[in-house]
Amino acid sequence: MTFKDLNLSTQLLNALDDLEFETPTPIQEKAFSVVMSGKDIVGIAQTGTGKTYAYMLPILRMLKYSVQQNPRVLVLVPTRELVVQVVDEIEKLATYINLRVIGVYGGTNINTQKEAVSQGLDIVVATPGRLYDLAVSRALQLKSIQKIVIDEVDVMLDLGFRHQLMNIFDILPVQRQNIMFSATMTDEVDSMITEIFTHPQRISVAKSGTPLENIKQYTYQVPNFYTKVNLLEELLSDSDTYHKALVFVGYKKMADRLFDRLDTFFPDQCCVIHSNKTQNYRLRSIEQFESGENRILIATDVMARGLDIDNISHVINLDTPEYPENYMHRIGRTGRAEKKGVSIVLSTEKELEYRESIEALMEMKIEQLNIPATVEISEELTPEEQPKVKEINNPNKRTNDEEAGPAFHEKSAKNSKVNLGGKYKREIAKKYKKPKTKGDKTFNLKYKKKKKK
């Protein structure tokens, strides 16, 4: 089947010809008629199989020309970088269509975005937080939304966007089409589908967690972080083989630590993105990596989730992800559009359990390679890897916690007395029968009168 066999308009076919796309991927072929039917849909396919075009082609095919101010299609994505990418892909498909599309996300001036959406639009691509801010301020009206697409919903839930997502669903029209595509399906995502979608039709090109066959996977057993860095330097020295390498790390501090080391070893060849970097810095890093100006990009999971960068030769996992789904999204950055790709995961002894979970999800073993003899095995440990010692050599440390310390002494006789409420209450009131309050005085007078009678 080719795109000409689908019920596409001439304008869309011309745009696909410009992009040199002839044959739809399996998910694009299966999803087209379901999205066109207006039913709720949940699509499962490996990362890199063209899920963005799978939902945008039928949406653009049905979207008629309009001059109304309010958007009719809403696309929700977890990160700013993904907003920019999806808007770019939509604009490519809409080259010959009169279409207004805007991307909105946090970290930029909201007043500028309010002015932009006030000009009128057909499709809005947004992160949940900024979209909700615009909707609450009444700058963006969502009453005309006919279709909502949720992309990378599992990341949104991991980032704590569930509350904002539910608020957005509450202000959307009840009569709408819900569309979701993902490479993995978690229990939390399935729960949300049950709660929000109406009898969704599920389309699965591959079982959740199935890797692409064109990605070769390898693993190294490495003792610690700095040995991983030494191995990484050895591998990346072959610039012909590792001509475009995406290195994933678990957290921001590790990303900066790795960048400092690699930038010294490979000057002007590395860039890094994580949430502490400014928006302009992050976009510039991605552009430099995509253009080939830098051949090594260091990224955290959230920053690189969903990004479509051409011709990534290798994805290297400096750490082994705790959640197998994250590994599937990571390796999906290579081997896109049926091209060959290579994935490498470095695991310490503590991370073996995570790697076994990944292998269980994929139902396959990752081929293990031996560390080259030229790689130095480092004994240096990061602060996180160093064992936590509880003052074992402290001469003043008590061996028995119940034993009294040197500063302990018995209370003096004066301080050993028990507070019984003070002399007024115990002695004076008892001796003189003097009432404490006006109420007691009144009570005593009545009691005395009764006694005389």
Image (cartoon, grey):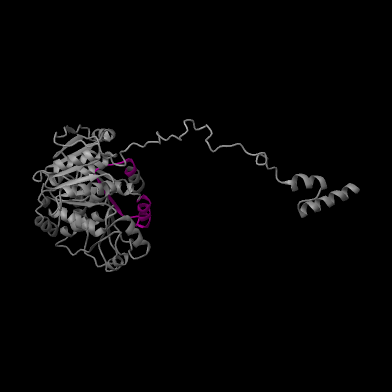
Residue 70 pos. (x, y %): 29, 64
Report the number of numbered marks: 0
Q: Is residue 59 above or below residue 248?
A: below
User: Which residue is at the front of the view, 81 or 134?
Assistant: 81
Any magenta on residue 165? yes
Would residue 392 be found to the left or right of residue 68 on screen? right
User: Which residue is at the front of the view, 159 or 126?
Assistant: 159
Any magenta on residue 336? no
Name which quarter of the figure residue 60 lies in: bottom left
Would residue 203 be found to the left or right of residue 386 on screen? left
User: Which residue is at the front of the view, 236 or 447?
Assistant: 236
Residue 237 pos. (x, y %): 12, 44
Residue drawn at x 21%, y 39% as measured from the top left: 228
Residue drawn at x 35%, y 60% as measured from the top left: 133
Region in magenta: 161-189
Residue 353 pos. (x, y %): 28, 33
Visible residue check, residue 44: no
Residue 370 pos. (x, y %): 16, 32
Would residue 295 be found to the left or right of residue 224 on screen? left
User: Which residue is at the front of the view, 47 or 6?
Assistant: 47
Visible residue check, residue 115: yes
